[in-house]
Image (tube, grey):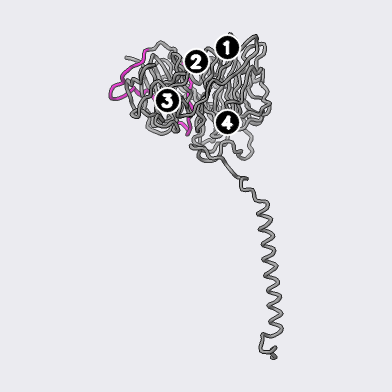
Amino acid sequence: MRYNNGMIPRNRALGYKVLSWLVLAVVAGAAVVCLRWWLAYDPAKDFVEFIPGMDGSLGASKPAAETVRIGEFGEAFNVAPAALAGSWPRFRGPDASNISQETTRLAERWGEAGPELLWSVDLGEGHAAPVVNNGRVYVLDYDEARRADALRCFSLRDGREIWRRWYRVNVKRNHGMSRTVPAVTDKYVVTIGPRCHVMCVDAVSGALLWGMDLEKDFGAVVPLWYTGQCPLIDGGVAVFAASGKKALLLGVDCETGAVLWQTPNPDGWEMSHSSVMPMTLNGKKMYVYAAVGGIAGVSAEKGDRGTVLWKTAGWNPSVVVPSPVVFPDGRVFVTAGYGAGSMMLKVSEEEGAYRVNSLYKIRPQEGLACEQQTPVLYEGLLFGILPNDAGELRNQFVCFDPDGKILWASGKDHLFGLGPYMTADGKFFILSDEGVLTAARASTEKFVPLDQARVLQGRDSWGPIALAGGRMLLRDSRRMVCIDVAAP
């Protein structure tokens, strides 16, 4: 074998050169691939806004396409309803004030054992609360075994199930699943499910009347943590906020499912967790809705029903859960969590022309702000629980002068988190996150606690309270109870 001046053989040198060129080619190819990937890379492609309290997947994310046959299944259990007085027919009660008008006297003290537990039922994970009518209790549950929205009807007397009506729909756990309150009359029950499916059934038999998909039919966007708004039945017409490309609000005949009127949505406002509230100004009836995008007043009168009377984008938080609180003089108080604070609007009318102005806007540390529950307007003052970002008064129950000043707070010994509250028989009933129920005097001067008892053993006791004939219905994330709060 010959050597080239003591160097490596010629054929081996040639092989090294070929190998070097191959390595360079591979490196160059990899560099091109990496460059193309880098140029195409979008760091925000899969971005999801994080909001404190949000867990799991985003409520607005779209699961795999599926056909939902609303109300397809039904089942009866041969149980008779209770012949008991009292009605709580919709979110925040008969007049949407969250103040009971019943004359039943309620106990001030429950004794060491607390209020009597009349019955309880297990529910799927969520915060959906019940309504009551004609001795029947209705709640839109999520049946995790069947993967279905299930409207369940129970006897108010003993909690035995009378019937249920359900449809299969995939809902992923996202800080709970169900979270809406039905609306009921003597004839109809209307529900809105987590993914914007509307169902109307016969209130007595549970027979399906009609169903509607707000996402598919009207272009609605499912909100964060799923649908939270609760329907309204007004004179046999179901009213709710589609908040989609085709309509902001809808009026649907409860008997036939026919759309009687719809409000255009040219501004592209989206669905919030807030519910449609009734309002009357100078004799004119209207519906008030706080969407993601703004707040509007829509006519509820026969001649121009569905027409926008006034609107403003001046109130536009990214998450809106509490519903508007309407004052008799045309003021509208709106509030939200996550730093949004509150705003007081003033709606005025002159010769049929409406105008809306902002009276003030405050931060959570400056007055009343609520993250989840809607404040109660009682004797001209507002009552509610302050959020975590309210400073020293956070999680306390407070009395707020609508002119802009907190009059009193419950104190650090009485904290309630995100729990619900209501007013009845001159008392406040306030439920904490942990399921502790507090009764307090409905005083405008100071916080006067009367009694306190643990009535639920679970967590996230957030569902609104219902009260009928001295029987109070409450729930945590997994269980609903009926307790006796009537005076002996």
At 67% across and 57% down in the image, what residue appears?
35
> Of helix, strand and loop, which mostly describes the magenta segment?
loop
Marks 1 and 3, the one that precedes in the sequence: 1
Quadrant of the rendering where the N terminus is positioned: bottom right
- Asked if residue 373 is among those painted magenta in the image, a careful observer would answer no
- Asked if residue 112 is among those painted magenta in the image, a careful observer would answer yes
At 52% across and 40% down in the image, what residue appears?
56
- Pointer 2: residues within 10 angstroms few (<14), some, or many (20+)? some
Residue under label 4: 167
Residue type marked 1? Leu
Residue under label 1: 281
Whole-number angstrom distance, CA of label 4 to CA of label 3: 25 Å
Identify the mark at residue 474; answer none if there is no mark: 3
Whole-number angstrom distance, CA of label 1 to CA of label 3: 34 Å
Residue 248 % position (x, y): 64, 24
Q: Secondary structure at mark 1?
A: strand
